[in-house]
Image (tube, rainbow, N blue to C red):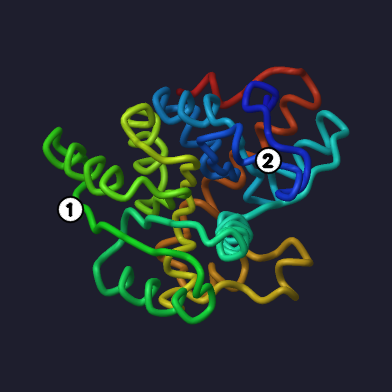
Amino acid sequence: MLKQYKIFENSLSDIDFKLIKIINTINPHSYCVAIKDEEFKNALIMSDILLADGIGIVWAEKLIYRNKIKKIAGFDLFMFLMRKLNNEKGSVFFLGSNKKTLNSIKNKSAIEFPNVSVDFYSPPFKSEFSSKDSIEMCNAVNSVKPDVLFVGMTAPKQEKWVYVFKDKLEVRNVCCIGAAFDFYVGNVKRSSNFWINLGLEWLPRLIREPKRLFYRNFISTPKFILEVLSFKIIGKSILQLFK
């Protein structure tokens, strides 16, 4: 089930960031989306590092393969790399979101990570980018040649865009971190460590944003549980039957 995705099993401190380029995350919802979206599936599979950003992925790995892995959210990756860049006096580029949020990120990071050089670009808000849009996005990044590119354009759009343009980006590491932009500046409140440690980070967010998160919690999550149980019992995907 998850073997083809080669989910990362260690700690972020074990990664040699000089040897990898693309870092993505996977959760039960994105797994279910990837069943029907081949391009998104390929983008996840071809990641250099794929993090388990969901307690459901951790549970599935343990139940099916007896692998004990850690949940590592996109926000955890973001904070880890910002601390690392601050120690190294590195540079970062934020691609995605709106100018107000991006300015807030730059202002806050200047206080918390003063040694990090920060640049950003806000792409057009649309479901699909034109060739002209993508060229402008690549040029904006390449004009800086940052150590790390954080992409926050929601899944699966961000992963699919990076998958197509990864070879045109002059950057060391590319990280698709979605909601981490909004978490960092407080546009969206991340669940407290109490809920995170219980494996219930999703619950307070669902209560705060029931309309936006209804599908992933009440449609994708049951599908994912059914998928895991089908692999455990009969060794086959049941979701593939309903593509």
Mark 2 lies on a secondary structure that is: helix
In the displayed structure image, the side of residue 111 where residue 230 appears, left or right: right
- The residue shown at (49%, 70%) is 183
Which element is circle 1 on?
loop
Label pair 2/1, CB-CB below 8 angstroms: no
- Figure quadrant of residue 138: top left
State the image coordinates of residue 53 (x, y, percent, origin top left).
Answer: 62, 50
Reading the image, the residue beneath label 1 is 124
User: Mark 2 is on which residue type?
Assistant: Ile
Q: Residue furthest left?
A: 132
Which of the two marks, 2 or 1, is nearer to us in this view?
Answer: 1
- Place of residue 132 in the rendered image (x, y in percent of width and height, measured from the top left): 11, 37
Q: Which residue is mark 2?
A: 225
Horizontal side of 12 relative to 134 (left or right) equals right
Label 2: few (<14), some (14–19) or many (≥20) C-alpha neighbours in 10 Å? some
What mark, if any, has residue 97 been given in the picture? none
The residue positioned 41% from the left and 65% from the top of the image is: 211
**Residue 32 position (above or below residue 198):** above
- Residue 202 placement: quadrant: bottom right
Label 1 sits on what residue type? Answer: Pro
For image coordinates 67% across by 39% down, the residue present is 16
- Please tell me which of labels 2 and 1 falls first in the chain: 1
| 74, 145: nearer the viewer | 145
Residue sitting at 56 percent across and 26 percent down?
239
Residue 142 to residue 203: above or below:
above
Q: Nearer the viewer, residue 140 or 6?
A: 140
Q: Residues within 10 Å of mark 1 (few under 14, many from 20)?
A: some
- Measured in 3D between alpha carbons, the distance from the residue under mark 2 to the one under mark 1, in whole angstroms, is 36 Å
Query: In this orientation, which residue lies closer to the viewer: 193 or 12?
Result: 12
In this rendering, the answer to whether 67 lies above or below 184 is above
Considering the image in quadrants, where does the N terminus appear?
Answer: top right
Q: Give the x, y percent position of residue 221.
A: 60, 47
